[in-house]
Image (spheres, helix red, strand yellow):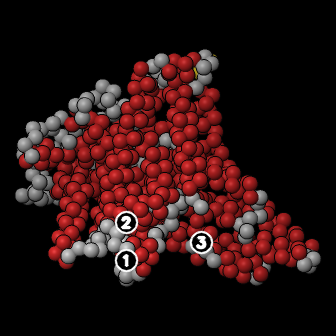
């Protein structure tokens, strides 16, 4: 990480202090940082070590903070469990489909909003409406969704969940892609217009390829949301379309104390998310604030 | 204004606008609508329609548990009954306690960590990596994980507090401790959001002010209070707005940790709506609750958005 103007520290920097005081201050800062990082990271450590313990070692008093012996039997057991491959498949397919669809429709809509062929009022209204749909707690639309999906006989189908996730992802994709499109220099668009490109040509052959990092980041955020979603998955699926979060929560009721297996599945489940999260670090703040704060 | 529109305007002013350009402009406007249409239609069908349907349902009594039951129109009865329902009122109280406590703690701790991350020690890489863990963890996974941590016999938390001389607690089984326990998990998961946003905000502040302050011999606390804090106000508002809106939406963690219990001590509004509508299938009443919930959140958001628009130049 190169040291730029922005990287230079700017907060805790007392001026008139002796170098001993300064060193003590630095040590204290490092100490606080270390302690807080250990506290924050501990649950994740607990998750992974529990997954690596023998099942009997997970329920001992006092609990084994550092496992004396590790095994991969939990992972083996979980991957051999009934229908687990179906549930993995469901999670992957549903998340990919929902991501693909929402990114496609959302990017197109965002591009149209970034051009100003439509009146300012319409664009403003749409953006506000889209922001509003993001505010709603999922539970508030869960009830009508449940009734509607059931009446359409679409319970326990992949389609129902995909549609749900696209509905929730679209506002986010539109806002995020709008930000990315607005960040792009206007000269490119102008040059394309002068060259006689239509809107679709500009979109597909010029702007989209250039906005690929933005598309990738948006897609990853959308994927993570669909992958992690629980309420609608548990409500709308029972077997055929059941996804991993529902499986995990199932461990709490039936196999209450099979912590080894449960944490093994949980560790496998959060692995893609962690990897993707690492890839999108640069745009994290933009994704978290819905584009309001740019990195 | 878009580059295309700029070009068109410039040409129009010079009176050199051939008919083909006007036609192209019209075609582009049509294409814009076509680009927008799929997303707008999709949202209309999947967001607006269910909400309106839910509004309609809230004026009916309908118990889906009873086979072949039909909704029965009862006007505003669902709503009036709610305001006298102790469960609903308690749920509002619990939700407010949850949101206010969680967001306050997150903000204070988050600000502290953000200051640490942007201070003279080069820890921002470490802090960012570690904070990604709770942030990206599936909420359901966080819930079951913390349930094992909170376990009264085999949990790690009781083990560690033993070193401080504190006897083992029941945590999520204890009516007085369940809500704080849940709040702790939520804070653990969402703290990174506050840290990342505030740190980004701090890093975007102009360096010259800080240099001048050092030359003037200001202490660290003075710098924080007089420079950092006021300049960060818009970012702080964004963070608070986001966190408050998101805290209201809590569900997965409470579902897996306590399911609203023990008793009703962690029954936030989203849990109550879930139980009413998807456990007891009182569809009409659950819909009425949902709409009151929506209205409440909407009003709060409007307040914050207006504050934000006032303070951002």
Which labelled disc corresponds to residue B223? 2
Q: Name which of mark 1 and mark 2 comes first in the sequence.
A: 1
In this view, the residue in front, A150 or B54, is B54
Q: Nearer the viewer, residue B171 or A231?
A: B171
Q: Residues within 10 Å of mark 1 (few under 14, many from 20)?
A: few
Q: Within the image, what quadrant is residue B98 found in?
A: top left
Q: CA distance from mark 3 to mark 2?
A: 33 Å
User: Can you tell which quarter of the image residue B2 is in?
Assistant: bottom right
From this viewpoint, is residue A70 visible?
A: yes
Residue B244 x %, y %: 45, 45
Query: Dividing the image into 4 quarters, which one contains the N terminus of chain A?
Result: bottom left
Q: Nearer the viewer, residue A127 or A103?
A: A127
- For marks 3 and 1, give the one nearer the viewer: 1
Decide: marks 3, 1 in contact (CB < 8 A)? no
Label 2 crowd bin: few (<14), some (14–19), many (20+), radius 10 Å: many
Q: Chain of mark 2?
A: B
Q: Which residue is mark 1?
A: B215
The chain identifier of the residue carrying mark 1 reads B
Q: Residue at label 3?
A: A183
Secondary-structure class at tag 2: helix
Which residue appears at 25% of the width and 29% of the height? Answer: B175
Image quarter for residue A45? bottom left
Element carrying mark 1? helix
Q: What chain does mark 3 sit on?
A: A
Measured as percent of width and height from the top left, residue B220 is found at 32, 66
Q: Residue at x 51, y 58 (%)?
A: B234
User: Can residue B124 be seen from the camera position used here?
Assistant: no
């Amino acid at each position: 990480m190169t040291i730029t103007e922005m990287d230079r520290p700017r907060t805790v920097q007392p001026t008139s202090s002796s170098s001993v005081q300064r060193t003590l201050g630095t040590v204290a800062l490092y100490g606080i940082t270390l302690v807080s990082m250990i506290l924050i990271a501990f649950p994740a450590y607990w998750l992974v070590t529990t997954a690596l313990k023998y099942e009997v070692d997970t329920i001992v008093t006092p609990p084994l903070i550092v496992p004396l012996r590790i095994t991969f039997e939990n992972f083996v057991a979980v991957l051999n469990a009934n229908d687990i491959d179906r549930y993995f498949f469901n999670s992957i397919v549903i998340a990919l489909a929902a991501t693909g669809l929402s990114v496609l429709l959302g990017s197109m809509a965002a591009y149209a909003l970034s051009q100003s062929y439509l009146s300012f009022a319409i664009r403003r209204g749409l953006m506000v409406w889209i922001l509003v749909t993001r505010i709603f707690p999922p539970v508030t639309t869960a009830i009508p969704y449940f009734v509607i999906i059931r009446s359409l006989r679409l319970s326990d189908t992949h389609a129902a969940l995909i549609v749900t996730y696209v509905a929730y992802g679209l506002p986010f994709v539109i806002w995020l892609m709008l930000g990315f499109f607005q960040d792009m220099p206007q000269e490119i668009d102008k040059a394309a217009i002068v060259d006689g490109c239509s809107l679709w040509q500009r979109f597909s052959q010029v702007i989209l390829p250039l906005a690929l990092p933005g598309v990738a980041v948006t897609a990853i955020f959308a994927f993570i949301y669909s992958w992690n979603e629980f309420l609608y998955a548990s409500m709308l699926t029972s077997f055929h379309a059941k996804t991993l979060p529902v499986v995990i929560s199932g461990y709490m009721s039936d196999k209450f104390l099979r912590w080894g297996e449960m944490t093994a599945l949980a560790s496998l489940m959060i692995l893609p998310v962690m990897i993707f999260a690492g890839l999108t670090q640069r745009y994290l703040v933009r994704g978290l604030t819905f584009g309001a704060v740019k990195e | 204004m878009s580059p295309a529109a700029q070009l068109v305007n410039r040409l129009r002013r010079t009176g050199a606008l051939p008919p083909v350009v006007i036609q192209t402009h019209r075609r582009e406007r049509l294409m814009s609508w076509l680009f927008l249409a799929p997303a707008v239609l999709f949202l209309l069908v999947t967001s607006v329609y269910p909400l309106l349907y839910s509004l309609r349902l809230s004026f009916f009594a309908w118990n889906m548990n009873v086979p072949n039951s039909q909704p029965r129109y009862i006007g505003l009865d669902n709503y009036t009954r709610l305001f006298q329902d102790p469960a609903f009122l308690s749920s509002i109280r619990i939700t407010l306690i949850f949101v206010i406590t969680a967001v306050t703690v997150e903000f204070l701790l988050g600000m502290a960590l953000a200051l640490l991350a942007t201070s003279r020690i080069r820890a921002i890489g470490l802090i960012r990596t570690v904070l990604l863990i709770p942030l990206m963890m599936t909420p359901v996974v966080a819930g079951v994980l913390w349930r094992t941590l909170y376990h009264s016999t085999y949990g790690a938390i009781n083990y560690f507090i033993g070193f401080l001389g504190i006897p083992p607690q029941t945590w999520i089984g204890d009516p007085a401790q369940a809500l704080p326990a849940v709040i702790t998990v939520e804070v653990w998961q969402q703290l990174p959001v506050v840290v990342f946003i505030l740190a980004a905000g701090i890093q975007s502040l102009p360096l010259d002010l800080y240099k001048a302050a050092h030359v003037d011999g200001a202490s660290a606390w003075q710098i924080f209070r007089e420079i950092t804090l006021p300049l960060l106000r818009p970012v702080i508002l964004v963070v608070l707005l986001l966190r408050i809106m998101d805290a209201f939406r809590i569900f997965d963690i409470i579902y897996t940790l306590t399911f609203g219990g023990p008793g009703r001590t962690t029954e936030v509004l989203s849990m109550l709506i879930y139980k009413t509508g998807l456990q007891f299938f009182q569809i009409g009443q659950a819909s009425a609750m949902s709409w009151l919930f929506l209205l409440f959140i909407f009003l709060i958001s409007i307040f914050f958005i207006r504050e934000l628009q006032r303070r951002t130049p």
